[in-house]
Image: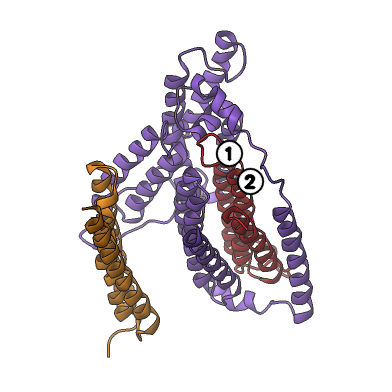
Chain colours: A orange, B red, C purple
Amino acid sequence: MSFLLDLWTIVAVSAGVFFFLAGTVGLLRFPDTLTRLHALTKADNLGLGLVVLGLLPHVSGPLAALKLVCVWLLVLLAGATASQLIARVARRAEPPA
Amino acid sequence: MSAATLYGLCGAALVGLGLYGLLVNPQPLRKILSFNLVGSGVFLLFGVVARRGAALGMGGDPVPQALVITGIVVAFSATALAVALLLRLHDATGSATLAAPEPGAPPAA
Amino acid sequence: MMMAMLLDGSLVLLILVVAVWTVAVHDSFAAVVGYTVYGLLLALAWVRLAAVDAALTEAAIGGGLTGVLLIRAAVRLRRTEAVSRAETPGPLFRAMAALVAASIAAALAVVVLSLPEPGPTLAPYVAQHIATTGLGNAVTAVLLSFRAIDTLLEAVVLIFALIAVWTLTPERFWGGLPGPKYETDPNGMLAYLARLLPPIGIVVAVYVLWVGADLPGGKFQAGTLLAAMWLLAIMAGLTEAPPISSRWLRGMLVAGTGVFLVIGFAGVPLAGAFLAYPEGYAKPLIIAIEAASMASIAFTLALLVLGPPERSDRR
């Protein structure tokens, strides 16, 4: 049983790290602000979500698991709002052709 | 080399980096940033001393850790005062530079 | 062991790279963003050094509030960038500065490498006497009982810094409203976030304050959270900062230090020394000081970020 839980942790955290890597590559390689924001949301939503899911089997109780999920939800909220605000400013600064 | 020593060397490097930035950057805002770098490097050195004092189930000596927490808050208030001074200088003279004004320039508002 | 060294080594490398970038990059706004990232990485370093309270404080104040302060300043100073940048010193000065900086860094590195091997520590003394405070978190016990005078003086320093910022008010705005008037779309994203996040933030702040007695946390981190929530509401245009001449605001600012001083002086007849706690009453007194201080710290930090008044209070 604990072997399966460890396997789940390794798989989920690796997948989450892969999405973080993809988001970072997108941030560095995409041409303009809007596409870079799009790449970053992948790191926020999927990357962090998978890492949190992977860590859930190893927490000390349901309350700690709830805290981890709350952290993910707060990061989603902050990331979504910040992306919207940055995108609005970028849209005004460089109007699409 | 233990982990604490590694972070200690990192703190020493940060103090050097911040000092270089403080001396070389002409913009006052960058000087404030570099000063904060020096401060955080010093706090890291405190943290290393705290970590090496781990004993009796505590992860680190709590006294330097408490000093660091006090230091971070006081460093923030010093930064806030420095930024307020800088913005006031900018509002009063129209430029944000630490160079002396030319003789014969009109006095500040 | 190897994995831990790998993690620490990569973190140190990342911190140094971001710090070098912050010092070297040309655009000031980019440097401020780099500094915020550096603050958050430093919070991770604090966790690796087993100082979780310091990590929380660094993430909240060093990364968060200092970042907001510096971003506002960088935006306002944007037009003076080119003029200031022209004053960059020549290569000879830069070489000498690099020499000075490198020698000081080398001296500190030598000190770090020659620290005594069983590191001297006060942890046994703290562990011996922590039962008198009724707390489980050693750092909170040190801050509010063993070194309470430091925390009291720090609260006073914060108020002095705020008064110093307020003395920079231009004559015509004396006693007025701090910060510019923020007007945003009342149905927009920022207003939505400012309605959704503060209730969560307040609950988390009270939790961090309460749990700081036995686990990492405490009044500085909680006060910073509250200050951030108030700043969010102000910057979304949902509420206005009160004029700095208002009595209740000034009362709130000194309430924390006032409670601290009252309890400190009450310790003289009741327990024999300034800031000594009577037997068995240590924990409730400490909680009272922390709660009052949290409110004062929240107001002080938020007002420090907003700066001196920029609008007159007279209608």
Q: Is residue B46 toward the left or the right of residue C202 in the image? A: right
Vertical placement of residue C207 versus C286, above or below: below
Of the 4 image quadrants, the one containing the C terminus of chain B is bottom right
Q: Using the image, tell me which numbered label, if any, was put on residue B61.
A: 1
- Residue in the foreground of this view, choosing between B51 and C55: B51
Q: Do labels 1 and 2 share a chain?
A: yes
Q: SS for tag 2?
A: helix
Residue at horizontal 46 percent and vertical 26 percent from the top: C289
Vertical placement of residue B18 versus C292, above or below: below
Q: How far apart are marks 1 and 2 (CA)?
A: 8 Å
Residue at horizontal 74 percent and vertical 63 percent from the top: C106
- Residue in the foreground of this view, choosing between A61 and C73: A61
Vertical placement of residue C257 versus C262, above or below: below
Q: Mark 2 points at which residue?
A: B49
Residue C31, given in percent of the width and then of the height, sits at 53, 69
Residue C208, located in which quarter of the rendered image?
A: top left
Viewer can see residue C85: yes
Residue B78, given in percent of the width and then of the height, sits at 60, 49
